[in-house]
Image: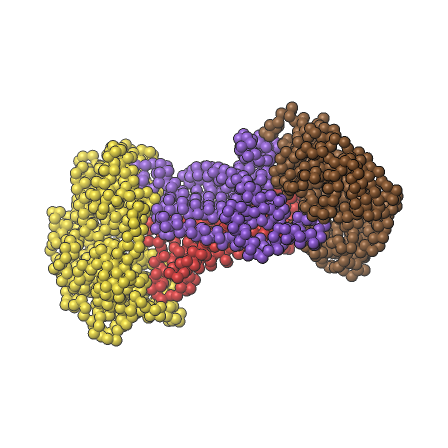
Chain colours: A brown, B red, C yellow, D purple
Amino acid sequence: SAGASDSGEQAKKDSMTIAFTAEPVNLDFTSTSGIAIPEALMENVYESLVRVDGEGEIQPSLAEDWDVSEDRKTYTFHLQKGVKFSNGADLTSEDVKFSYERVQDDWKNALKSKMDIVDSIETPDDLTVEISLKKPSNTWLFNMTSLVGAVFDTEGTDDLANEAIGTGPFSIEEFTRGQSIDFVARDSYWGETPAVKNVTFKYFQDAVSASNALKSGEIDVVSNLQAPELAGEFKSDDYQIISGTTNGEVVLSMNNAKGIFKDKKARAAVMHAIDRKAVLDTAWAGYGELIGSMVPPTDPYYEDLTGVWDYNPQKAKDLIKEAGIEGEEFAFTVPNLPYAKAISEIVSAQLKEVGLKANIETQEFPAVWLDKTFTKHDFDMSVINHAEPRDILTVFSNDYYIGYDDSKIKKIAEKADTGTEEEYISGMKKIARTITEDAAADFLFLFPNLVIAKSDVAGIPANRVSDAFRIADLSWN
Amino acid sequence: MSENPSTTSAGEASADRRRRTKLRLNSSMIIGGVLILLIVALALVSFIWTPYGPSAVDPVARLQPSSPEHLFGTDRFGRDTLTWIMYGARITLMVGIVAVGIAVLIGTPVGIVAAVFAQYPWGAWLGAVIMRANDILLAFPALLLAIVFAAVYQPGTGPAMVAVGIAAIPGFARVARSGTMQVLGSEYVRAAKASNRSVPAIAIVHVLPNIASMVIVQASVAFAISVLAEAGLSFLGLGTQAPVPSWGRMLQESQQFLSTQPGLALWPGLFIAIAVLGFNLLGDGLRDRFDPKMEARGNG
Amino acid sequence: MDENLLEVRDLTITPAGAQAPVLQDVSLSLAPGERVGLIGESGSGKSLTAQSVMGLLPEELRAEGSVSLQGFDGNVLAAKEKTLARMRSDLVSMVFQEPMSALNPLMRIGDQIAEVLRIHGEVRRGDIPGRVLDLLTSVHMPDPASARFAYPHQMSGGQRQRVMLAIALANSPRLLICDEPTTALDVTVQKHMLDLIAERVAAVQAGLLFITHDLAVVAGVCDRVSVMYAGRIVETGSVAQIFTDPQHEYTRGLLASSDLESTDARGKLYTLKTALSYAGPTEAADPTGVAGSGKEVASDDADEPATASTGEGLSTDTSAPLIDVSGVSKHFRSRGLLLRRRSPVRALDDVSFSVAAGQRLGIVGESGSGKSTLLTILSGLDRPTSGQVRVGDIRVESASSTALKSLREDLQIVFQDPFASLDPRMRVEDIVSEPLVARGMARDERLARVEEMLLAVDLDTTAMRRYPHQFSGGQRQRISIARALVTRPQILVADEPVSALDVSVRAQVLNLLTDLVDDYALTLLFVSHDLGVVKHLCSDVIVMKDGRIVESGSTEDIYANPREDYTRSLIAATPSLAGALASAT
Amino acid sequence: MISYVANRAIQFVLALLVASVVVFALMSILPGNAAQVALGTNATPEAVAALEAQYGLDQPPLIRYFDWVGGMLAGDFGTSYVTGAPITPVILGSVQVTGILVIAAIILAIVIAVPLGTFAALEQRNWIGVTISALSQIGIAVPNFLAAIILVIVFSLTLGWFPSQGWMAPVEGLGGFLIRLVLPVVSLALVQAAILTRYVRSAVLDVMREDYIRTARAKGLTRTKALFVHGLRNAAIPVITVAGVQLATLLVGAVIIEQIFVIPGIGSELVRSVANRDLVTVQGIVMVLVLLVLVINFIVDVLYPIVDPRIRKAS
Ligand SMILES: Nc1ncnc2c1ncn2[C@@H]1O[C@H](COP(=O)(O)OP(=O)(O)OP(=O)(O)O)[C@@H](O)[C@H]1O
Ligand SMILES: Nc1ncnc2c1ncn2[C@@H]1O[C@H](COP(=O)(O)OP(=O)(O)OP(=O)(O)O)[C@@H](O)[C@H]1O
Ligand SMILES: [Mg+2]
Ligand SMILES: [Mg+2]
């Protein structure tokens, strides 16, 4: 319809344009944090030994299969045969060893700590990698599905910021900073050739622009709509609206270490004062899920804890009286992100109902929020989407900005990680419940994976369980 | 932003003609004045009465069209739009007053001083320095300043007002300077010097009253510009922040409801337009009333 | 009678929104080859009449009546712009009253003259530059070859007026309208211009409509005269008839007050009010103009030498002159034409003279000869490039600001343009009391002094609370004089205080000055390019040209026996009504 | 004239120098540090310190300032801490984009405003003139982002004539470039045209009252012709002043339009770099903006005496 449909029907079949919000500032996730780079590169350009599927199960990737030793400390991975990097080099076990040792030595991304547990890496032959851990871990293999597991060519790390050389189904044809990334399918890919050969990631600061572009046919998919109210406009046969889960828990965080929310009664009052259903409906148009804890439903240790704190303003008022904080003002630092700003308006209104006055202070995200709230812990209340997978233990550790006293859960966590799978699950459940019952933070809702696409696009995963946005499975109907 | 172009002396007859029109209250002024009074009235009334509280959310009654209960409808949180428009009038006026206040109080004296300095051999370079500094300031538009302020402090009405105000300083400095130059070059200032008046006395007795009209005109235009600028900054998230009601922010947030709830964009858009129109018309009217050509006669 | 070249019938002009017309039932006719003068009160509608004939009335004015022109079909007042444009290019030309603003500031004057030739289309393109040069030469433009490339702002007022004349004469129009074409010119140049106009009009048998307030000029140029007063033509007749036997009271007043040689019973010049007792010129027609002595000059200042000193001045040393100017030069750095090097304008070049206390010194000379510059230097508003100025004990050229302060308590100045020197946003009482404020006088006392002074200049006290624009030109002039005199200065420096006034108001102001000089024992420095006025008022005179003093001495002496050529030509060129009438008959 | 230009040129260079100090100082007070932002939520203080050292952020300000200025003089704005890429091409690219956008908008605005404003002045008393004035008043009162949104809804989403967003360099395809340029340029130009129309109208009205127009008519030109030959150039001075100021404010002011239409201009680049605390890039961009604004001022200042010989005398 629009003037931009310069690509005819024929060409349409093997190309697709997808809108994203957070743009990669460069291509190097080893030294730059944030979700934007792995979202574009993992599973598309870089691959790990293993990956996680839509149900949260770990699946083989570069490793055909793997063995775990009796003491659960040594993993032996058997690599796929005939895997080539996009620069033509063959994948060997040396590359894996090089890549993983590099995590510990050269990476600057804070997530590199996920590899701290690795003791040694051996390469008995070209296609076998033996990785020994310092102690058994239930989380390590899962962590390997994230960016720390990415395998680089020994010769391919000179200019990571601008050139990505991986084994994945796509290579980057063009990276226009701040605007778009053009992916092109590789002929020499070891696995199945993707159905759509040319995929473009286009970055939109503004959700309305993205939705307009979809309406006028200039793009095909909006990967995560940041203005969910707009979804209503796509309720027709021409489009599909996919609302799945992510790993992002939208947390109304309270400073457990100092200020008025040091007192559990104050935090409990907040838990009772917030009508999470209303928050979800008004701030995010009802898209998303109420969770009640720091665990998304796709995690193996998920448990529905929405009933622990009911919406009960009267109770909240009583608790406030008990805590002696009636009419107190406190600092509510809000990152300037669409969801956070919307939430802050309804939350502060609900708190006002029970007699708490939140002084909203909008902080530029990431720079100022990271500096003041996150690093300097200069806040009473804040709201943020903690998007990393399985991050409960990180967020509720002692020195994290929330300041949760983790003495109760530290032991359980250690035991769970080194124990059997069942022990792991039950241990983690216990941790999640403890945190919720402590009213350490208010888990408002699970951030939705709200994808809008033309109706003839297939292969879009409903749930986002890893950072990666996998494009190899996309196709046109 | 605008500089009144200096003009050469007009004939006495035409100056006479203009003086005659000066006595009329022109229609631009009347219409502009009425529009502004409307905004002022909204703001004043909001202090004693609004249909609802500004933060009275009602998730059940969200996104309603106009109705007897909610004359202008409700927003995504079920807040009353009319209430927000009324509160927003306060912010709009405050932004205008503070921004223009900053610009007038700094820009005008700077312009006068630069012009006065330029009269002296020892001050010519100082005058030039002041005006060059002014040019540099012109290179920092409101938006840039607002970005910096938002980063240094936090985004909000205050930094936005200050940014808009600072960005408007050069305009006033220029107008004040060129007006002062004209006045200082005039025969009646020579006469005042011959009457033994000191330079500060001349600046107060002769310069100020004679450039006042230009400054007033400039102020009304700057007022309109700052209303738009605040709206633009709020649009970028650099202006007024939640939960303070502001028309710019309302307009920005209405975007995603344009097709479902156009009223959310209509009302703030309409009131911004009314405010801007009001100030512009008033400025036009004032411009006609105090025709700058009157000053130009001093050039001779 | 032949068909008239111009026929104006019942012209009535009303400004939009106003009730009363500013011009009422004006009828006027002009035969081919005829030269008609239009004189009258300032603001009586002379310029509007002329503009109506051109079809160039300001839009906000509504005109009724008819204007027809030989060679043009229909009524000019109702014609379309397009046909009017043709008429203006082919039939009529006009020199506008205000030469300062009538030229496009962004266009070289040569191009502006060429434009009219191009529009008219009779001169071949290639010949245009040559024609432009001819025209500039014919209006006595200095250095016409480079003047072509000058912009209007680079020309003096008189030069611009000559450019306007060149434009008007470019096409040999059938009707030429001149609205005060010589106000900015000194008398010698004025004479040239008047001769040129007369010659060109005669050459093609064109009609001439000539507007001026200088009666002598009208008498010299025109055959017939119409007198306007308050929006009507009150009298029309031949020159001789009007000036020798005026019928209307206003015309008589005009004639009486234009005569600087005659005074009434109280020794005053005649004004409109006292014109009834005017008996006509006291002297026989004298072709050389104003030579000879008026009785006042003779009785008051008969034999005071230029450097004599009387009375007490600033100076304690009574033998020395009160004001002593020696070797004063003032150079302005001017920006020459674009391609030329800058050369400084020598506004004053080695000027020396002295003035005794109580003396009345007139300064006459060419426009642009440095008269105003000299006065500003004297009053310490500007500094000379070189030379010394002493006023009393004070060395003005190097005076400290305190010294200047005390100088200004004794020396006051009346500026050349009265309106421009009054702050438009101040009330008259504040304007007049400004010098007193500077002295730190209390408000009550100040107001009393202001009131007294306003009465002295014949303004009533209701004037105090009004603004400058609410006064007529003559009244403004008096406000300006009141301000200068309110501190009771010993010295009054007045710059062309009467040049902008019509003769009746001029007479009033001159009377006032004479009174004040007597009452306050003033030392007076009086600049004018009107020799008659100087002769009437001053005891001594210096004549300036190109920044230099060419001649000085007692008024009587100089007027009777001018030694320098320039002075002689000035005197010779001064038009006189009597002379004109004599030669006309 | 020559010394006037030389004088202005010297002032221009000095102003640039002062501006560089101001910009550098401004950037130094921005809170949040580049290393911290780059490393994100889980960075250790040691890692941050190491990265700071790598970027040279631990150097004393004076050294950093001279490094920076020296680099710029050599045409090198440095390398971004955040993207790891050289900044110069980024700035040049985005300046070009914004330049095209803004200049096209100003030209369009002038093309609309000059005839419209002149017409409004000529027909001042007719309904046409009044209508044009009223429209221009309303045009000014509409925020440009609102204009953009409405244009997109009408011409892109409803009529489908133009794309709703996007940018294509002219070398990639002239058709694609032009068609994408239309809506953003129009939404910028409409408001600017409305503002300019008012200035043109009042300038023309002023000029029409001038006596030299009467002189020109007395020479035999019609009113309209006189206005064109003698009036427009005289009216140009205030219009040039305003257009210059508009051009300067649009350079950054276009950012809203850039965001709505997803155009990689200098404003967007600035907002993005500030968000990423890419301070070297921010400094570079601001400096380029200052340079451009000063250049515009300089050009306007030099245009004055060309247009108006009277100004040549006042240096
Ligand atoms: N555009 C106008 N609108 C209203 N009144 C006007 C206008 N132009 C002139 N007048 C008035 O018409 C009257 C006649 O003006 P005009 O210019 O013809 O006078 P004049 O006789 O030429 O006087 P002067 O000798 O001072 O030039 C004056 O009272 C003047 O104020
Ligand atoms: N500020 C100035 N800058 C440059 N030149 C000037 C300046 N003031 C005066 N002049 C020039 O100095 C000369 C003398 O000017 P002045 O005003 O003293 O003449 P004037 O004798 O008073 O003439 P008029 O009779 O026309 O008033 C003129 O050529 C004038 O152009
Ligand atoms: Mg006149
Ligand atoms: Mg003079």
Image quadrant in which you'd find residue D181: top right
**Residue A165 appears left or right of C252:** right
How many marks do you count on the picture? 0
At a point 29% along the width and 41% down the height, the residue shown is C112
Residue B282: x and y in percent read 49, 49
Judge by depth and name the residue closer to the eye, B265 or A341.
A341
Is residue D190 visible in the rendered image? The answer is no
Image quadrant in which you'd find residue C318: bottom left
At a point 32% along the width and 46% down the height, the residue shown is C338
**Residue C572 appears left or right of B87:** left
- Hey, which residue is sitting farthest front in the picture? A124
At a point 18% along the width and 34% down the height, the residue shown is C2
Judge by depth and name the residue closer to the eye, C319 or A409.
A409
At a point 16% along the width and 63% down the height, the residue shown is C553
**Residue D15 appears left or right of C76:** right
Is residue C543 visible in the rendered image? The answer is yes
- Hey, which residue is sitting farthest top in the picture? A10
Residue B89: x and y in percent read 60, 50
**Residue A298 appears left or right of D264:** right
Residue D263: x and y in percent read 58, 39
Judge by depth and name the residue closer to the eye, C297 or A60.
A60
Judge by depth and name the residue closer to the eye, A385 or D62.
D62
Residue A93: x and y in percent read 76, 38
In the rendered view, tell whether residue A476 sits above or below residue A323. above
In the rendered view, tell whether residue A341 sits above or below residue C538. above
